[in-house]
Image (spheres, rainbow, N blue to C red):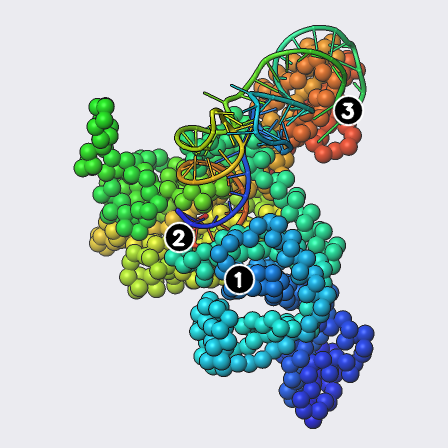
Amino acid sequence: MITVKFPDGATREYGVGTTGTTVVESISKSLAKKTVAMRRNGELSDLSDIMEDGDAIEFVLRDDEAALELIRHDAAHVMAEAVQELWPDTQVTIGPVIENGFYYDFSRAEPFSMDDLKAIEKRMGQIIQRGAAFTREVWSREEAKRVFKAKGEDCKIELIDAVKEGEDLKIYKQGQWFDVCRGPHMRTTRDVGQAFKLTKVAGAYWRGDSNNPVLSRIYGTAWANKEQLADYLHMVEEAEKRDHRKLGREMELFHLQEEAQGSVFWHPKGFVIYNAMEQYIRRKVNAADYKEIKTPQIMDVKMWEKSGHWAKFRDNMFVVPDETPSMEEGAPLLSGDAKLMALKPMNCPAHVQVFNQGIKSYRDLPLRYAEFGCCHRNEAHGALHGLMRVRQMTQDDGHIFCREDQVQSETEAFCDLLDSIYSDFGFSDVKILLATRPDVRAGSDEVWDRAEGGLGDALRATGREFEVAQGEGAFYGPKLEFHLKDAIGRSWQCGTLQLDFVTPERLEASYVAEDSSRQRPVMMHRAILGTLERFIGILIENHAGRMPMWLAPVQCVVATIVSDADEVASEIVARMKAAGLRVEADFRNEKINYKVREHSVAKVPAIFVVGKREAEEGTVSVRRLGAQGQTVVPVEEAIMALLEEATPPDLRD
RNA sequence: GCCGCCGUAGCUCAGGGGUAGAGCACUCCAUUGGUAAUGGAGAGGCCGACAGUUCGAAUCUGUCCGGCGGCACCA
């Protein structure tokens, strides 16, 4: 006999060889009906697993949050079976669960079309109806390789070889179809249910390596029920409506065009947002004792060789030959032996040059430089994406030169500054990652040990939680990545803090210590918004274009109902402009309905309507974006309220 | 950069081997109307670029460019 423990602390005895299924059936038929898997000693596993003495069991019902992962995983298997039934010459590779769904990568001569997806969905529905049981077998590696080889599944051979020694090689079957899989799975394909949808096809590299062949990936989403699926599809639609590229065009904020791929043309309204942010950050960093500087856009390649960028980052850099292009017809434009310059992809080497001027004392440290540095990076064409991924970007960059024993207090001060700025922008959910040494890097392992240790310790001392991102650091040092979550739950990396022992060494930065000796400063690279372009993109999507008053390009439109009110209204507009508000007048010969709709669609946060009545009474009818009605308020009162709201968060009392 | 899809007016899109259509936006005329579209008229396009097939290409084929979705890379 064996003893099985239940979550409520109760125990029951069963015969040897008892499975989870037997246990749940022994409790209640209705519970058994709803149970699709179990947690055995805390770990999700097959209900058909044989229980051992002392095991703790917890049932996973199909409607449980935990079952979603299983539904999606099983749906991926069902999709793979459907695809192979429809096109037997297709090889299956891997099919994991991802956020909101799953995908499966297939190897096939012909790519899938959207029509194919419909056919696959239909076949999946049938496979689910058939309700074949998921069963598990453990095969020897040789046996598995022989079987998959015979089926022509070459990718699977590689995957089998990748399964760790000592780990069972598990095969999951559903009817005739089977695959190598870690599991667990639910009872039958019927447990997948019908709340799934295949969403897109895409190319993806085998094993995520761009040197490998491209596979056809099919993405799908799957949920416990149709309502959840509908909610999800609705959410996707909402996210599309927030697309900053669409809103940017509609709101006349910026545009992009092919002659300047990846570089933004800021329009007047968009540049208002840009300037408001720059001015805000300028005030914040000044208050935090940074000195603002401005450094060259183009520098001799020799400088980049020295800093290490030329060796490690060259493939992302734009070069500029220091040569006049030939004016001669038919002659080569460039000689090819001119001195090479490069557009800066980062500001750090230039900041070291500023530091290196004159002699710095330990008394000068920590020395903090800030720059709205305009950088160029030659990003791959396929990587470009609206404002989120550009080739010309302006960072709210800064470099702190300090002693190693100041790293901790500087880290703390930086984290506090970052928190205060993010909360001013309305972001409260911030995740921190500690990114460690990448494969391609400068500096010795000893230096990296010290840098990673120092940054990790400093962060721990601030009491903040963080996760480690192995191998994700910058080439010159480890970094903290600050990821913020937006209004619809998406995560964006914005802020960064990087500890760098390498660059000061390479560019020979030094200061005079108390004992008159020359010492190397430590350099901390840091940014909070990341790049202004990207951060504005995030803000647009976060607010669905309805920017908070202090950032809104047009804060208020004063609209008249009859032309008799124009004179009074233009006085109001003048008064508001004088008070520093961004206000526009709309005295057109149009109905008020028309004007209200137009400015609402343009996402202007406030409309002051002036009709005959208001003009006579000295009031305005205030209509706020998104509100149903309006309130009639004395002019001065309405202006003061707007002014208050339009004050940037750092300037409020 | 790689894979797939797409490219017709400022925007959203229809059409399709015999040299183009709608709605919105724009311009003009009338309307002075109380809170998300007043009515009428007009103007606007080498159908992404270049080759090829054809008597004839915006339409078919190819190449390139660009956009979109992924991948890889990354702020």
- Label 3 close to label 2 by CB (< 8 Å): no
Give the label on residue A90, or none. Answer: 1
- Seen from the viewer's position, the closer of residues A497 and A58 is A58
Secondary structure beneath dot 1 equals loop
- Seen from the viewer's position, the closer of residues A262 and A43 is A262
Q: Are marks 1 and 3 on the same chain?
A: yes
Q: Residue at coordinates 65% horizontally, 53% vertically from top-left? A: A118
Q: Is residue A59 left or right of residue A208?
A: right
Q: Residues within 10 Å of mark 1 (few under 14, many from 20)?
A: some
- Seen from the viewer's position, the closer of residues A506 and A576 is A506
Relative image position of residue A232 (x, y in whole percent):
68, 52
Q: Quadrant of the N terminus of chain A?
A: bottom right
Query: Mark 2 to mark 1: distance in Å?
Result: 46 Å
Secondary structure beneath dot 3 equals strand
Secondary structure beneath dot 2 equals strand
Which residue type does callout 3 highlight? Val
**Among the 4 quarters of the image, the one containing residue B8:** top right
Residue A624 seen by the camera: yes
Instruction: Reply above or below: A369 against A332.
Output: below
Q: Which residue is mark 3?
A: A632
Q: Is residue A28 left or right of residue A283?
A: right
Which residue type does callout 1 highlight? Thr
Query: Mark 1 to mark 3: distance in Å?
Result: 69 Å
**Mark 1 vs 3, N-terminal side:** 1
**Mark 3 vs 2, N-terminal side:** 2
Q: Is residue A52 left or right of residue A434?
A: right
Q: Residue at coordinates 48% horizontally, 32% vertically from top-left? A: A256
Query: Mark 3 to mark 2: distance in Å?
Result: 53 Å
Q: Is residue A593 left or right of residue A81?
A: right
- Which of the chains bears the disc numbered 3? A
Viewer-side label of 1, 3:
1
